[in-house]
Amino acid sequence: MTEEDTQLLAVFEDRMHELIRLCDARLLRLKELQATLEAKEEVIRQSKQDYEDLQAKYNTMLTARLITANVAEVAEARKRVSRLIEEVDKCMKLIKE
């Protein structure tokens, strides 16, 4: 092996070591990014779960509000029916007299 071959081999080895260091650095960065991605995906998953819980609570409250409104309507209807019955009773008393 000549002097030039030895120098080329030394340069090649240095560049290979540099390439390996760069690859290791990139792998480390990739692992960091994957960890960050997993954390963000967990936050998104939790946010979706919170949204679904809030949506269910909203639907429950909306249903309760509708039922409450219907109860008020039923009470109003009962009052009207009671008034009508009272008027009918008055009319029947007048007819009997």
Image (cartoon, rainbow, N blue to C red):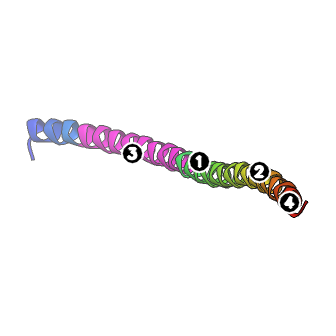
The reply to whether dot 4 and dot 1 touch (C-beta < 8 Å) is no
Tell me the kind of residue under disc 2.
Arg
Graded by Cα atoms within 10 Å as few (under 14), some (14 to 19) or many (20 or more), the crowding at tag 4 reads few
Instruction: Give the residue pinned by disc 1.
Output: 51
Q: CA distance from mark 2 to mark 4?
A: 14 Å
Task: Say whether disc 2 or disc 4 marks the residue closer to the N-terminus.
Answer: 2
Instruction: Give the residue pinned by disc 4.
Output: 89
Camera-nearest label, 3 or 4: 4
Please tell me the numbered disc located at residue 24: 3
Task: Say whether disc 3 or disc 4 marks the residue closer to the N-terminus.
Answer: 3
Q: Nearer the viewer, residue 35 or 93?
A: 93
Q: Nearer the viewer, residue 6 or 82?
A: 82
Segment colored magenta: 13-42
Task: Say whether disc 2 or disc 1 marks the residue closer to the N-terminus.
Answer: 1
The reply to whether dot 2 and dot 1 touch (C-beta < 8 Å) is no
Q: Quadrant of residue 94?
A: bottom right
Q: CA distance from mark 3 to mark 4?
A: 97 Å
The furthest residue to the front: 97
Q: CA distance from mark 2 to mark 1?
A: 43 Å
Q: Quadrant of residue 26?
A: top left
Camera-nearest label, 1 or 3: 1
Task: Say whether disc 4 or disc 1 marks the residue closer to the N-terminus.
Answer: 1
Residue name at image x 24 percent, y 37 percent: 15
Graded by Cα atoms within 10 Å as few (under 14), some (14 to 19) or many (20 or more), the crowding at tag 1 reads few
Q: CA distance from mark 1 to mark 3?
A: 40 Å
Camera-nearest label, 4 or 1: 4
Camera-nearest label, 2 or 1: 2
Tell me the kind of residue under disc 1.
Tyr
Tell me the kind of residue under disc 3.
Asp
Please tell me the numbered disc located at residue 80: 2
Q: Nearer the viewer, residue 28 or 71?
A: 71
34 to the left or right of 60: left
